[in-house]
Amino acid sequence: MVNIWPFSGTRPFNQEAKSLIAPSTDHLSIENIEIFKKNNYWNYLKILNPVGQLKEKDSLLEAKLHFDEMKENNVIKKDDKNNFYIYQIDFQEHTQTGFLSLASINDFTINKIKAHEKIYQSRMKERADQMNNLQTQIGPIYVIYKSQKKIESLLESIIKKIPNYDFESFDGSNHKLWCVDDINYHLELIEAFKSIDFFYIADGHHRIGAMEYLSKLDNLNIDKFMISAFPNTQSKIFDYNRVIRDLNGYSEEKFIKLLSENFDVNLVNNPFKPEKNKMFGMYHEGKWYSLEFIKKINFNSFIDKLDINILNQFCLKEILDIKDVNNDERIRFIAGCHGLEALEKKVNENPDSVAFSIFPSSVADVMKVADNNLTMPPKSTWFDPKPLDGLVVYEF
């Protein structure tokens, strides 16, 4: 079983939630984020990324001052009672219903809360410094669990009521939150989760790593962290596409010839969005191609068969010389929520560059990777919609 607890969250009080939550840089341009910060004095973005170019110690100070100012002015307020926060998100005709709660750091340590990405120490430490500065977790770790009828029934019994919050976010998604302080309901939900063996991290690997790191510090007494949990049947993954700055010195003709050794390459009339595994779209010099992986090979493991690894191994590494996908300056990642036109725009702005559209990984793939203690390459999954940062925060 996995452990969950209700908690007293800190949430918007004398301010609209829509203006407080922190926009994601994956949804908004840097310019639009600056406009958002300017137009919303009270905003968590000033805490997560306070004032731009100040030195780190000054940035941390500015973040803490803004957070304290929000509390002092009752812009946000901590609940007097423990709650489970039932959370529903609607986005592009898709609805998912879950909840915010606390979970156990020890469950993560003993692999009851499973990861599918590698946690990089530098990024984890940066998150830890940010959290320790405020002694607060602003964004939940997004986890999924295997759907169970009893849990879904408990959640559905709440969403029939009027929500405490109901608003449209910056990306067009609608967010509803119900604050439930009923102790009997708490006991029922906790009991239902005794049948759930594992949580699977969808998004927030470095946050959870940071919380585990902080739990080991002598001056803190932390054994829990905040999650947003949704059933696997409702969580949704979009494609996470790639743009490479150049063809590694090859001409267009030579590049396509090399690709053709492992892929069936065909020029197509329209932007190509793959609709099945082992198919890819490619955009270069104003033209779209379909790529189908045709090389006959016995893969060493399940992870090698994933589309993202096929593209990495047989194109990015072998042909374009991208050895380190996570750190190579020649690669950019574009979330599928921006559409194929975002790939075209990026390539059109940079002559000689090439973009690849990728069939998204499935939730089942993510869970299988985690169950086998494997890791997916960086930027393999784009879970969307996501729970918002700053709607409920956990002061630990």
Image: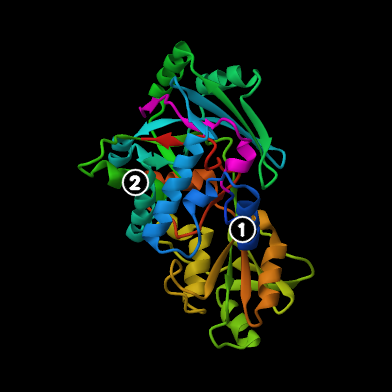
In x, y percent, where is residue 156?
60, 21
Residue of label 2 = 132
Number of residues whose C-alpha sits closer than 10 Å to that of mark 2, classed few (under 14), some (14–19) or many (20 or more)? some
* Residue located at (61% from left, 35% from top): 15
Looking at the figure, which quarter contains the N terminus?
Answer: top left
Q: Which mark is residue 34?
A: 1
Which region is colored magenta?
Answer: 1-22
* Residue located at (49% from left, 68% from top): 312
Amino acid type, residue under disc 2 in the picture: Asn
In x, y percent, where is residue 122?
34, 60
Looking at the figure, which quarter contains the C terminus?
Answer: top left
Residue placed most toward the observer, 254 or 83: 83
* Residue located at (63% from left, 24% from top): 163
* Residue located farthest toward the top when viewing the structure as drawn: 184
Is there any visible trace of residue 332 in the rendered image?
yes
Amino acid type, residue under disc 1 in the picture: Glu
SS type, badge 1: helix
Separation of residues labelled 1 and 2 (CA atoms): 25 Å
In x, y percent, where is residue 104?
33, 33
Where residue 283 sits, quadrant-wise, is: bottom right
